[in-house]
Image (tube, rainbow, N blue to C red):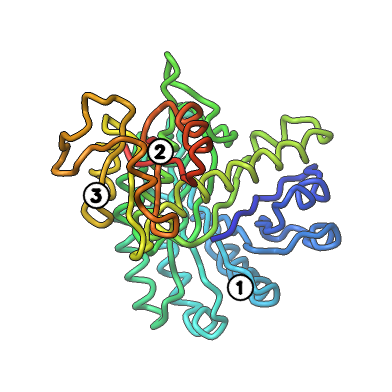
Amino acid sequence: MESGIVYVDGMDIQGVTEAGLKKIEVKYPGDTSDIEKNGGSIAGIIVTLSEFFIEMASEKLKKALDLAKNKSAYIVIETENVKNASLLEKLADEWRECIRSSQVKIYIENGYTNENGRFYHNDYSDGPRLIQLVDKLNLLVAADSFGICINVGHANLLGINVRDMVRVCGKKTGIVHINDNDGNSDYHQMPYTFTTGRGVLSTDWGNIIGDLSKVGFCGSFIFDMKGTFTRTPRELHKVMAELLVSMYKEWQESCFKTEEYLAFPDKKIILFGAGRMALNYMQAWGDKYPPSFLVDNNSELWGQTRWGIPIKSPDDILLVPENQRNVWICNMYYDAIGAQLDNMGIEYRCYWDHYYM
C-alpha cells in the first residue's frame, strides 16, 4: 500500500516530496520534468474524457498510454460530465491491442454530471455500474487492464454511500482519491474538513478506511486536494503534506495493520475492557480472533462472563507468559489504562473502534 498526491499548478513539489509524498499523479499532458527533478516519481497519468470531441479523446488516450508505459505509471480516467459509458467502450475497442500490449493499468474514476451547479449521476457514478463496465472492458481487450478508482469526494457529492461502494467494488479498486466536501460543491479539500453540524463529519472517514481494510485494499491512497493546495500559501504546502503523511500513517498503523497484529496463533488475545468497545471488537473480529479473556478494573465483574468470555483481574495478565500475550486496550480511557499497563511492565496495543462502527 502506498500514498501519493495529485499535482496542481503552483504546488511546492520539492516541499511535498520532502514531506514524504513522492508518488505523484499528473494531468495529461502536464510537464513531468519539474516533478522528477524535485524528488517525485510519476505514479499516474490523469486523462479527462470529453464526449464532445471523440477524435481528440482517442488521440489523448493513445498518447497517455505511451507516456504511462514510459513512466511505468497507471492511468486514471476522469469521467465528470461524460454521461454515457459508450465513449470509453469505443476507445477501448479502438485501442484494444495497444492497451493489452502496453500492460498499463487503467483505473476508471467515479464521476458525475454538473448541470448549472446541480450534480447528477452518470454511467460512471455507482459501484455496480463501474463493476459491470470494468468487466466488459477487460473482456473486450482480453486482459485485466481496467480497474476502479474511487473518488470519495465525488461519491459524497452525489449522496452515494461510500462504504457500500467500497464493499461492492472490492478488490477491483486499485486507487482511492482522497478529498472532502460538504455534499454540495466539489471542493477537493482535506479529509475531516467538513461537518453536517454538531461535530458530525460530512464524510464517514473512519468507517470508509475500515471497510477498505476489510475488503483487502492494497492499492494507493492518492490525496486529490486541488482545493486545499490552490488556496493555501505555497510556504505552507510542505506542512500540509506532512499532515497528510501523518494521516496516511495513522490509517495504516491503527487500521490496516490491525489484523496483522491480531494474527499471532501462538499468542493469547486479551482485551482490557468489557464494555461497548469490547463489543465492537467482538462484532468486527471476535469470530476470527476470539479473545482468551477480558480484563476490567471493576472487581465486581471478575468471575463473570460476557459473550461467553471470562472477565478477570488485570493481575491475571501476568499469569500469561510474556511471549504468549497479545494485549489490546478496548476502552476509551486509553491513557490511564496505558499508564497502568506500563507500570505493570505489560506491552499492549490500542484498539480503535471508530474504524469498525
Residues 246 and 347: in front is: 347
The residue that mark 2 highlights is 329
Q: Amino acid at mark 3?
A: Gly
Q: Amino acid at mark 1?
A: Leu
Q: Position of residue 185 (x, y in %)?
A: 51, 29
- Image quadrant where residue 266 sits: bottom left
Kind of element beneath mark 3: helix
Q: Amino acid at mark 2?
A: Ile
Q: Which mark is residue 286?
A: 3
Q: Label 1 near label 2: C-beta < 8 Å?
A: no
Q: Label 1 near label 3: C-beta < 8 Å?
A: no
Give whichever of discs 3 and 1 has the lower sequence position: 1
Give whichever of discs 3 and 2 has the lower sequence position: 3
Kind of element beneath mark 1: helix
Q: Which mark is residue 1?
A: none
Quadrant showing the C terminus: top left
Task: Judge depth for marks 2 and 1 and give the one in front.
Answer: 2
The span from disc 3 to disc 2 (Cα, nearest Å) is 15 Å
Q: Which mark is residue 65?
A: 1
Task: Judge depth for marks 3 and 1 and give the one in front.
Answer: 3
The span from disc 2 to disc 1 (Cα, nearest Å) is 49 Å
Q: Dot 3, crowdedness within 10 Å: few (<14), some or many (≥20)?
A: some
